[in-house]
Amino acid sequence: MNAQLGGTITPADGLTLTRVGYGAMQLAGPGVFGPPKDRARALAVLRAVVEAGITHIDTSDYYGPVVVNELIREALHPYPEELHIVTKVGARRAADGSWMLSRHPEDLKAQVYDNLRNLGLEALDVVNLRLGTADAPNGDSLADQFGALAELREQGLIRHLGLSTVTPAQLDEALAIAPVVSVQNLYNLANRQDDALMERTAAENIAFVPYFPLGGFSPLQSETLAKVAARLETSPQKVALAWLLRRSPNIALIPGTSSPEHLQDNISATSLALPDDAVADLDGIAG
């Protein structure tokens, strides 16, 4: 079953993730705010994730807010022993649905407690500290924020720590405080500014989790991807995911969907073999 999901990665003792995971963000309403249009379908997708053998669900209490974590708990609690739920802290939502950065150390701790309560857990498998903006790191010191999460790790409320939207220097700073098991950054065929960081994480046995696998493409880049997909008689999404899986063995994907059918399509990217000419065309997309 793990082979069907691209195999596994083990960035830390007690943490083995299928390389194809599931990003739960899309289970909330429009704009990642409010309840889903079809609650039963959202619950069905989550159950299909576990039935497929996926052991890596990415979420956050600010999806909804709270809505997605409550759906995960309703669908899957008590959780299978092999399932790892990865959450993020560093933001909250306003009443109008807007996103508010919230990175004061004490509020980060409060967000961890919110996630524990809403997921129905005594300890969180992985907590990612989200920094920067939606698509770029900010380069600020993270010592106080990461240190606060490291305190909760020492107390047993968090098992592993990760980072999201960070620079190599911020990774250095974090590693001086506590082990890091994952880095989530914007990375895809068209956005490869973090090639060196991705290769570094591979060398240091840190999972690299790219988000926006189809985000930020120019029309020309999208056209190239579409042509490759047409030549292989498949979808651009599947080609983009297959390229990421091929790029490095420490890459773990978290494609999101609210459709059980689309979930299976994402999983099937693991069986898509990219011929050399296709890889050459895809590698050239970033320019």
Image: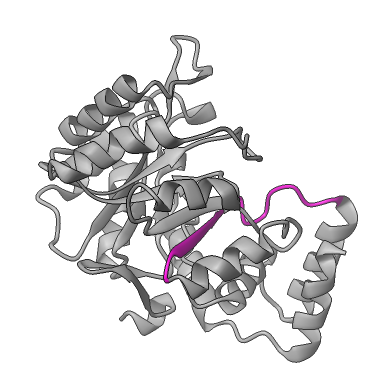
Q: Nearer the viewer, residue 286 or 27?
A: 286
- In the depicted structure, whether residue 19 falls above or below residue 78: below
Whether residue 256 is visible here, answered yes or no, is no
Please say if 29 is above or below 277: above
Percent position of residue 271, x then y = 52, 83
Give the prevailing secondary structure in the magenta stretch: loop
Q: What range is drawn magenta here? A: 205-218
Residue at the farthest front position: 176
Q: Quadrant of residue 221?
A: bottom right
Q: Residue at x 20, y 31 (%)?
A: 118
Of residues 134 and 196, the one nearer the viewer is 196
Residue 53 vs 140, above or below: the answer is below
**Could you say which quadrant of the image residue 282 lies in?**
bottom right
Residue for point 83% across, 66% down: 285
Q: Residue at x 71, y 89 (%)?
A: 275
- Quarter holding the N terminus is bottom left
Q: Quadrant of residue 4?
A: bottom left
